[in-house]
Image (cartoon, rainbow, N blue to C red):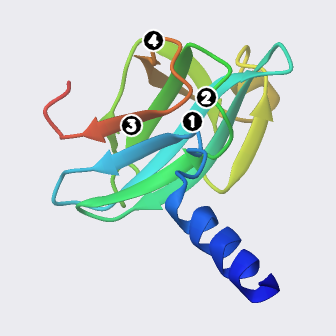
Amino acid sequence: MKLAAIAGAALLAVLLPHEARAEFTVCNQTLDVVNLAVGQKVDNADQTDGWWTIGANQCVNVIREELENRYVYIYATDVFGHAVLTGSIEMCIDRRRFSIRGIDECWQRGHIAARFVEVDTLEQVRWTFFLTGNRP
């Protein structure tokens, strides 16, 4: 009887849907490898983080926790450092891996200013952005 209860509990755990992980995923649908930087509000301050390398026709989870912000900002370059996705929101990046608090006075603080694309997640807790290469 005990064995049947354990087997039943194990079967129930497999059959019940697991709670979905909330995240922000970027899928690279281009033929090139891209390097991605992400900006968002963290503890009421603007923050940028980078870099994620995303191969052609690959996806990467860049924010692994539940989205708390309606807007997420992204910037992408090719392997030579040339922008392949740019927008109108200026934020800070660096040449190597970085986490930068604040988006003002990038140059004065020793960083590089880059123009990020604003992604409206419509207040969803999970969002996927498809990088197609068709954006200006």
Q: Is residue 94 left or right of residue 35?
A: right
Q: Amino acid at mark 1?
A: Val
At label 4, counting other C-alpha atoms closer than 10 Å, the crowd grade (few under 14, some 14-19, many 20 or more) is few
Report the residue marked by disc 1: 38
At label 1, counting other C-alpha atoms closer than 10 Å, the crowd grade (few under 14, some 14-19, many 20 or more) is many
Of the residues under marks 4 and 1, which one precedes in the sequence? Answer: 1
Q: Are marks 3 and 1 in contact (CB under 8 Å)?
A: no
Of the residues under marks 2 and 3, which one precedes in the sequence? Answer: 2
Question: Where does residue 78 sit, x and y in percent of width and height?
Answer: 33, 53
Q: For this rendering, which residue is in front, 20 or 112?
A: 20
Q: Is residue 18 above or below residue 73?
A: below
Question: Which disc number belongs to residue 128?
Answer: 3
Question: Which disc number belongs to residue 81?
Answer: none
Q: Amino acid at mark 4?
A: Leu
Question: Where does residue 72 sit, x and y in percent of width and height?
Answer: 54, 23
* Res 68 quadrant in image: top right
Report the residue marked by disc 2: 39
Q: Nearer the viewer, mark 3 or mark 1?
A: 3
Question: Which disc number belongs to residue 122?
Answer: 4
Q: Nearer the viewer, mark 2 or mark 4?
A: 4
Find the residue positioned furthest to the right.
43
Question: Where does residue 130 sit, x and y in percent of width and height?
Answer: 28, 39
* Res 109 quadrant in image: top right
- Which part of the image, by quadrant, shows the N terminus? bottom right
